Amino acid sequence: MAQVSINNDLGEWGLSTDSGERARLLQSPCVDTAPKSEGEASPEGLGRGTTSTIGAIFIVVNACLGAGLLNFPAAFSTAGGVAAGITLQMGMLVFIISGLVILAYCSQASNERTYQEVVWAVCGKLTGVLCEVTIAIYTFGTCIAFLIIIGDQQDKIIAVMAKEPEGAGSSSWYTDRKFTISLTAFLFILPLSIPREIGFQKYASFLSVVGTWYVTAIIIIKYIWPDKEMTPGDILTRPASWVAVFNAMPTICFGFQCHVSSVPVFNSMRQPKVKTWGGVVTAAMVIALAVYMGTGICGFLTFGAAVDPDVLLSYPSEDMAVAVARAFIILSVLTSYPILHFCGRAVIEGLWLRYQGMPVEEDVGRERRRRMLQTLVWFLLTLLLALFIPDIGKVISVIGGLAACFIFVFPGLCLIQAKLSEMEEVKPASWWALVSYGVLLVTLGAFIFGQTTANAIFVDLLA
């Protein structure tokens, strides 16, 4: 999930001596079209050799885990039960890990240090621009999801504080969902989104890790020792159809999407080798898989088919342990929104400067005005959409489809292009096998994205 850590600079993980250092890797690439110097292009250049293998595993796990785990019990329900959910996750994990390895290989081959730079260098301008636009839309949609999550958790906490009965609507204007989301957003999120730098990200990362593990532990404990008032719905044992299984894919993609942030992490390693990186991402994905499976299986078996798209909403408001989990999620999301906004804003800024043909640092005054305008427009649009789209499941489905592009489509295109450029240097059998695998990745990602988009459009039209 990552959606919390897209395109992070190493310094933002607390490994820099200057916590306020500007996250240069977040800036959109290719604004300045001048070629890189020899030192910059060298794999042994400055900026490498600071992250250990264990540290890289932790960073990838942290980038992967996030608020997306709240939707995994519903994904198991959608897929048709525990067996179908486990099989689907295990099958997709093979492609998820291979995509991370492909990105590292292409990053090393192209000497580029961020996801979009790799796509630009390997696949060309058109695909590079498409990748940047997709990142902007993905981060925008994730910010909407974060605001909805804040509203969902606040509703439960306020219900207890106001001593309102379960399921009753807000009786006062100051407890109304739209007011509480707006107040929280203006007081906390907007001030954190305006600055040019995001040196506070190391604190957000810590909150995300603590909150994620605590939520998972509570869900497992509540399954083992359930409360008397919690009665599960129907426990599905098989999928209703193949379509139902496919409908669970966007949630899994959203949960495991750490690919955009993986390229800077790979380049921050002391020995950025593809083979070593393969072990790093395999270990990281196994850890993430354990967390997501623990949450998904126990949450689904606790509530069955009646589980809410946000599993914490299925628990009683009065449960104090769950209330602490809700508070952790709110804190995590409050600090994660500005980071995702920073990523999207950096991409939009880069696209605008490239369109205008201006260097990045041409006019500080104009940059400040653009940043304020971009931040306000982004913030207000995400807030308005969050207020009028109360169903987190719909938002997760859409951004999960976009996550499939980062996991499957762009790595597949990079693999195809990289192997086409090496056609004369490799054996025909190996060349065809790798190109075919790239085509498979692109096809799978396009299928998930297309199905998600079609569902979002036609379900709303039919409704």
Image (cartoon, grey):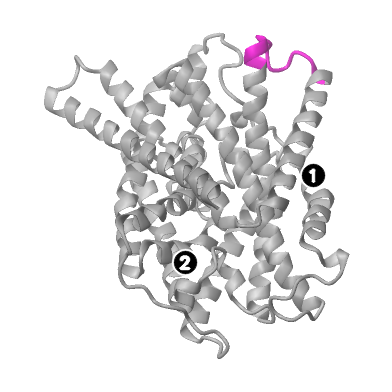
Which circle's residue, 2 or 1, is located before the other in the chain?
Answer: 2
Relative side of 262 to 204, left or right = left
Q: Amino acid at mark 1?
A: Leu
Residue to which mark 1 is pinned: 190
Query: Which mark, residue 73?
Result: 2
Label 2 sits on a secondary structure element that is helix
Q: Is residue 13 visible?
A: no
Q: How far across and how far down the image is residue 358, in percent? A: 68, 11
In terms of depth relative to the viewer, which is nearer, 271 or 113? Answer: 113
Q: Is residue 432 above or below residue 296?
A: above
User: Which residue is drawn at the image coordinates 31% and 39% (left, top)?
Assistant: 275
**Region of the chain picked out in magenta, as a range:** 353-364
Q: Residue at x 50, y 36 (%)?
A: 268
Query: Is 226 positioned to the left or the right of 380 in the image?
Result: left
Q: Amino acid at mark 2?
A: Pro
Q: Position of residue 14 (x, y in %)?
A: 63, 46
- Which quadrant would residue 153 be assigned to in this image? bottom right
Q: Give the x, y percent position of residue 253.
A: 44, 49
**Residue toward you, 53 or 76:** 76
Q: Secondary structure at mark 1?
A: helix
Crowd around label 1: few <14 · some 14–19 · many ≥20 (10 Å): some
Residue placed at 55% from the left, 84% from the top? Answer: 230
- Give the camera-side residue of 147 and 200: 147
**Front tag of 2 and 1:** 2
In the rendered image, residue 412, in percent from the top left (x then y), is placed at 34, 32
